[in-house]
């Protein structure tokens, strides 16, 4: 595999279908944007859907070359049997290629594949909404070919291609597999200064744990040579933002009260999925919160529910490489870091090099809230991703609470205080792209349980408030 360049999905598609396919897809993409714009305005930004979608198509991957030129280059490289690295000067020894904002925002699909899959998800919803309600924790099998649209068959074909591709046949090619560094949970009272997450992030809140001079990384993660190494989400929220996601929110199955620690401990012992807080958007009289969606790739999801999405980032990830996205996320975080090096790092160095983006959504069955690139990271557009809380905490999950704490600390958290609506199709497309990764991300296609709200005494006192745009 070290002698074969990785062909993007778009390049493979163009090699198989020729130049006409690219031109045809661009025409279809423009028609789709025009038709969509005639009906409704996009929830993301003030420009028309057509202008934004065409711009996104033309600017994806930092376009400086045409899709044809890129695919021809890939084709020639593949035929010569040499890698991309051997065709370009190698970086100086010891250097680190800094991922740019374009790298950070690079979609896992190529241009043609991206526009094709986006069109497929939109056209699937315009053809009619599902009447099926998936059972919690279940995964509905895709429809038979006889009932699938052409676009749906095209998406399924990409997954079929993955099954026979040489890029996935040898597990040893996943150089990040098994790279998790094991740090056991411990009793919170026995740990030194180890701030935990998820905390109260209401503006003005300050935790009781004095963390000294340790500060969260308030830069954009890509500016700190960090890249997203995973995406996963939790049922309800692990963080608490008063007036946005708190005990006064609602959903199809109600909400959680402000923590009753004993009751939540009993629920966990009985094997119940611990859920978090809900947003305030849910309206049982509005069909976009109640009409079910035909999930094809995500599992155990429900329209109207609240989910907190996490994008772990790391400067030690396989940034810009095939193995960038990993499940479990620890493999991605520690891909290029060993224990001998980790133990030499200062706490501030860790907080500057490992972080998580957190953003909260209520799922709606409404394509006005479709966003095609959730796998990239936090959405920052309009009100999305503008009111951010920064603090240092830990990893989360239901194996931790206010008695048993995570040893993966301190890491930076950048969390959107606002709750936003997002279409079910946005999540389903993200799950589809997760299934295309080299690593098996099937363990993250469903919502995880939520850690109980971190007690004030375990929350850092270094929260930073920042509004990115007024």
Image (cartoon, helix red, strand yellow):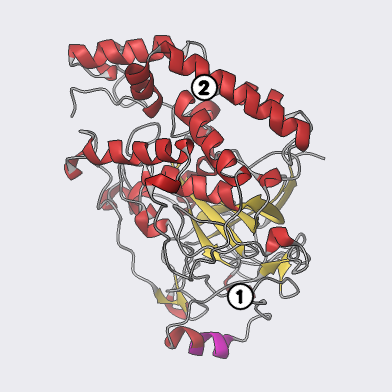
Query: In which quarter of the view is residue 49 placed?
Result: top right
What percent of the width, then of the height, locates residue 287?
Answer: 72, 61
Density class for disc 2 (Cα within 10 Å; few <14, some 14-19, many ≥20) is: some
Q: Count up the numbered dots.
A: 2
Residue 360: give x, y in percent of width and height. Answer: 63, 57
Q: Is residue 14 above or below residue 224?
A: above
Q: Is residue 141 above or below residue 16?
A: below
The magenta stretch spans which residues? 261-266
Q: Nearer the viewer, residue 426 or 345?
A: 426
The residue at 50%/30% (across/down) is: 116
Residue 441 in view, yes or no? yes
Q: CA distance from mark 2 to mark 1?
A: 55 Å
Q: Which mark is residue 25?
A: 2
Residue at 58 percent across and 60 percent down: it is: 308
Foreground of the two, 90 or 420: 420
Q: What secondary structure is marked by label 2?
A: helix
Mark in front: 2 vs 1: 2
The correct choice, above or below, for 294 with respect to 93 in the image is below
Quadrant in the picture for the C terminus: top right
Instruction: Where is residue 183? Give x, y as percent.
Output: 33, 64
Secondary structure at badge 1 equals: helix
Residue 457 numbered mark, or none: 1
Q: Is residue 249 rendered to the left or right of residue 315?
A: right
Query: Magenta stretch: residue 188 in it?
Result: no
In the image, residue 373 sits, relative to residue 271, either above or below, namely above
Residue in the picture at 73% in, 71% down: 249
Magenta: main secondary structure equals helix
Between 467 and 4, the one lying in front of the other is 4
**Dot 2 and dot 1 residues touching (CB under 8 Å):** no
Left/right of residue 270 with respect to residue 357 in the rendered view:
left
């Amino acid at each position: 595999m070290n002698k074969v360049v990785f062909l993007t999905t778009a390049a493979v598609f163009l090699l198989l279908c020729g130049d006409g396919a690219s031109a045809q897809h661009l025409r279809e993409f423009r028609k789709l944007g025009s038709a969509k714009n005639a009906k409704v305005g996009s929830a993301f930004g003030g420009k028309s859907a057509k202008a934004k979608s065409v711009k996104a198509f033309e600017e994806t991957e930092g376009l400086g070359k045409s899709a044809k030129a890129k695919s021809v280059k890939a084709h020639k490289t593949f035929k010569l049997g040499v890698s991309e690295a051997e065709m370009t000067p190698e970086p100086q020894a010891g250097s680190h290629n800094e991922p740019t904002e374009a790298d950070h925002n690079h979609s896992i699909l190529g241009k043609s594949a991206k526009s094709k899959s986006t069109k497929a998800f939109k056209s699937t919803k315009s053809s009619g909404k599902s009447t099926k309600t998936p059972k919690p924790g279940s995964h509905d099998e895709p429809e038979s070919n006889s009932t699938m649209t052409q676009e749906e068959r095209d998406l399924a074909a990409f997954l079929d291609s993955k099954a026979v591709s040489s890029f996935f046949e040898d597990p040893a090619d996943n150089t990040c597999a098994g790279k998790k560094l094991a740090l056991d949970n411990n009793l919170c009272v026995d740990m030194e200064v180890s701030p935990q997450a998820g905390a109260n992030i209401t503006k003005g809140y300050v935790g009781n744990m004095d963390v000294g001079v340790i500060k969260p990384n308030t830069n954009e993660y890509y500016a700190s040579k960090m890249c997203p190494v995973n995406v996963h989400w939790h049922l309800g929220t692990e963080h608490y933002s008063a007036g946005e996601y708190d005990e006064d929110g609602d959903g199809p199955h109600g909400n959680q009260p402000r923590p009753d620690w004993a009751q939540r401990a009993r629920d966990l012992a009985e094997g119940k999925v611990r859920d978090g807080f809900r947003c305030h958007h849910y309206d049982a009289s509005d069909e976009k919160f109640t009409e079910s969606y035909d999930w094809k790739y995500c599992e155990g999801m429900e329209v109207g529910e609240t989910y907190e999405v996490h994008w772990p980032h790391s400067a030690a990830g396989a940034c810009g490489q095939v193995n960038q996205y990993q499940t479990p996320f620890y493999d991605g975080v520690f891909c290029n870091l060993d224990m001998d090096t980790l133990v030499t790092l200062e706490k501030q160095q860790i907080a500057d090099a490992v972080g998580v983006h957190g953003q909260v959504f209520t799922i709606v069955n409404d394509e006005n809230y479709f966003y095609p690139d959730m796998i990239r990271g936090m959405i920052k557009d309009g009100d999305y991703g503008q009111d951010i809380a920064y603090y240092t905490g830990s990893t989360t999950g239901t194996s931790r609470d206010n008695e048993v704490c995570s040893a993966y600390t301190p890491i930076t958290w950048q969390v959107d205080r606002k709750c936003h609506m997002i279409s079910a199709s946005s999540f389903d497309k993200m799950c589809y792209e997760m299934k295309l990764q080299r690593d098996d991300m099937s363990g993250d296609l469903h919502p995880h349980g939520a850690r109980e709200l971190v007690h004030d005494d375990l929350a850092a006192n270094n929260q930073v408030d920042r509004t990115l745009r007024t």
